[in-house]
Image (spheres, rainbow, N blue to C red):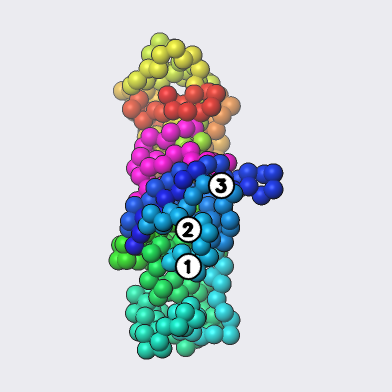
Amino acid sequence: MATVTLRRLRKAFGTVEVVHGVDLAIAEGEFIVLVGPSGCGKSTILRMVAGLEDATGGDILIDGAIVNERDPKDRDIAMVFQDYALYPHMSVAENMGFSLAYRGVKKPEVLRRVAEAAAVLDIAHLLQRRPRELSGGQRQRVAMGRAIVRDPKVFLFDEPLSNLDAKLRVQMRTEIKKLRDRLRATTIYVTHDQVEAMTLADRIVVLRSGRIEQLGTPEEIYDRPASAFVAGFMGAPAMNLLPVRIADGGVVLPDDTRLPLSHHPTGVAEATLGLRPERLAWLMPDVASTGAELAGRAMVVEPLGAETLVTLDIGGHEVHARVPPRSVRMAGEHVRLAVDPSDLHLFAREGGQRL
């Protein structure tokens, strides 16, 4: 295991700068997830740490030593790619042990490490197969095994689950979490999937246009997003964001509904209100409200089995809510939702920073 430090890390392709002076300190054994929309620079940062891209500026340190000028093979890292990158003519065992054999490790030691990694990943019965004889999930396990046998200081994962179907992605996410808890290795993991980020990370780095928008634990990112961008990106479905006016200790929504605030920002007349869909509580039609609520007609109703996702029209703006199964059955129904003032998030109308 090792520490990884990025100091004012920059990357430009010609005149286009895609990473703008990123500072990040990763502790020994920490699992860091870089997340953000396409083009935010997350994979570019990972490739610079791996040595597959040269940094335009700044430093990359592994265990306190600057590695900018070191070749990838001399950085003591192992990388798992999105497309598996397996040799089609080699068996699983040969794929997993290739990097060790290339470095001159004796055959008995190669076989021992391959057997140990295969046991950890439950692929010992696949060691003699070729990649074409494996499913997508099995190929990804082989790619992970190839990284594990190296026993590197740092593991790098570049969207390793994006090529898998939804069910297999959930299964492999669980397997990666088990592996993470077992190895406790320093890991940098890139994904665009917020669920992967929330379930795997010790800390999440939310990137936007080559800059860190917020760095924190999954709970910090979810409970106190630093900006409207983070609030709108993290969560499935994402946080509802509505333009509001601030007056008389509360907020006025686009349909003139008034909601009280648990804290009142001073000197602010207009803001963006954030509401998590899962924090909006469904109210039965014949039950009197004892607190704040918002209401509207259902535009879209999506039954999901254990719950229903309903989209309301609130003054011309869509508001998504998670409600109990079969509580709302069809579009056009009138829906009432209770709102707890402590669940309201306010962001600046300009710039989007948290108020």
Which mark is first along the chain, 2 or 1?
2
At x 63%, y 43%, the residue is 17
At x 47%, y 79%, the residue is 103
Q: Is 285 left, or right, of 95 in this rendering?
A: left
Q: Is 239 left, or right, of 185 in this rendering?
A: right
Which mark is first along the chain, 3 or 1?
3
> Which label sits on residue 57?
3
Q: Nearer the viewer, residue 301 or 236?
A: 236
Q: Nearer the viewer, residue 70 or 117?
A: 70
Q: Are marks 1 and 2 in contact (CB under 8 Å)?
A: yes
Q: From which residue to which does the magenta span run?
A: 201-228
Residue at the extreme right of the image, as rendered: 14
At x 38%, y 51%, the residue is 26
Q: Badge 3: how crowded within 10 Å, few (<14), some, or many (20+)?
A: some
State whether residue 196 is above or below residue 142.
above
Q: Is residue 10 visible?
A: yes
List the residue tagged with mark 1. Answer: 74
Report the amino acid beneath label 2: Val
Residue at the extreme top of the image, as rendered: 248
State whether residue 86 is above or below residue 206.
below
Q: Quadrant of the C terminus?
A: top left
From mark 1 to mark 2, how far is it between C-alphas?
9 Å
Q: Secondary structure at mark 1?
A: helix
Report the amino acid beneath label 3: Gly
Q: Secondary structure at mark 3?
A: strand
State whether residue 31 is above or below residue 337.
below
Quarter holding residue 318? top right
Which mark is first along the chain, 2 or 3?
3
